[in-house]
Amino acid sequence: MPVEIHISRAGPYDATAMAAIHRTCFAKPWDAAAMAQFLASPDVLCLMGSVADSSGGIAGGMLIARRAADEAELLTLAVAPACRNAGLGTALLKSAMNLLREAGAVRLFLEVEEGNEAALRLYRSLGGEPVGRRPGYYEGRADAAIFSLALSPPAADDGACQQEARPSIHAQGRDERKPA
Ligand SMILES: CC(C)(COP(=O)(O)OP(=O)(O)OC[C@H]1O[C@@H](n2cnc3c(N)ncnc32)[C@H](O)[C@@H]1OP(=O)(O)O)[C@@H](O)C(=O)NCCC(=O)NCCS
């Protein structure tokens, strides 16, 4: 079933929804107060993403990244289980990469748990390369891989990241949701 993806900058009113999505993805979720702090920070980019099919839309993804001069760091990326594997995570990250590049960043860094195949695949598909490791980063157990993504200009035909006058981005999702 065709799905339509919508990405927009989050506003103060999104703090609760962001926390709700985060809670579906992480054992130690960030609460709405934490989200509100990110939303109030001028150096932090907060995006919300939704997928819609013929039966309606659901706000199921969020991303937070911080920029400092020409470098940026992905603080979190979360897509609720019901919305996964439809292209939403890719659309969120592509949009963030374009917006961060427009703000002056040339490189995006992130940490990802080794063994998180979905995230690793997503980051590699957008040109991410491992540049280091943090042993025992996750609760002293799992190691983290540090990835770097170059924020080069988008390809001319990359409709997923074109920004409209209103800061929202539409993209066509995968034709069909693949089994996760
Ligand atoms: C990682 C995550 C954001 C991906 O979101 P998503 O919307 O499912 O991603 P997409 O649909 O854009 O798919 C991205 C890639 O991952 C692949 N993928 C998705 N689910 C997968 C799975 N369970 N196993 C392996 N690969 C998977 C997709 O096939 C796609 O690769 P492709 O373009 O080569 O086909 C989502 O799984 C998530 O929120 N996980 C929990 C939180 C998390 O780990 N966040 C990242 C922390 S670093």
Image (cartoon, rainbow, N blue to C red):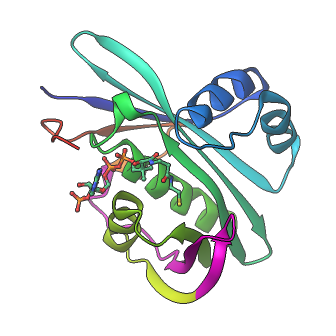
Task: Find out whether residue 165 is within the magenta segment.
Answer: no
Quadrant the C terminus occupies: top left
Rendering coords of residue 33 (x, y %)? 85, 31
Question: 106 or 109: which is nearer to us?
Answer: 109
Residue for point 39% across, 68% down: 120
Q: Position of residue 73 (x, y in %)?
A: 68, 68
Quarter of the image holding residue 94? bottom left
> Residue 115's quadrant in the figure?
bottom left
In this view, which residue lies farthest toward the top?
A: 55
| Residue 165 in sight from this viewpoint | no
Kindly identify the residue that appears in the image at 72 percent across and 78 percent down.
70
The residue stretch that appears in magenta: 133-159
The residue drawn where x is 15% and y is 41% is: 178
Q: Left of 176 or right of it: where is 150?
A: right
**Residue 75 picture quarter:** bottom right
Residue 140 colored in magenta in the image: yes
Q: Could you tell me which residue is drawn at 59 percent across and 57 percent down?
A: 99
Q: Name, please, the residue furthest toward the bottom.
A: 131
Total numbered labels placed on residues in the image: 0
Left or right: residue 57 compared with residue 113: left
Q: Position of residue 165 (x, y in %)?
A: 56, 36
- 2 to 9, vertically: above or below: above
In the picture shown, does residue 150 fall above or below 163? below
Task: Find the residue positioned furthest to the front.
Answer: 141
Quadrant housing the N terminus = top left
Q: Is residue 65 above or below residue 124?
A: above
Q: Is residue 66 visible?
A: yes
Q: Residue 67 appears at what percent x and percent y? A: 75, 65
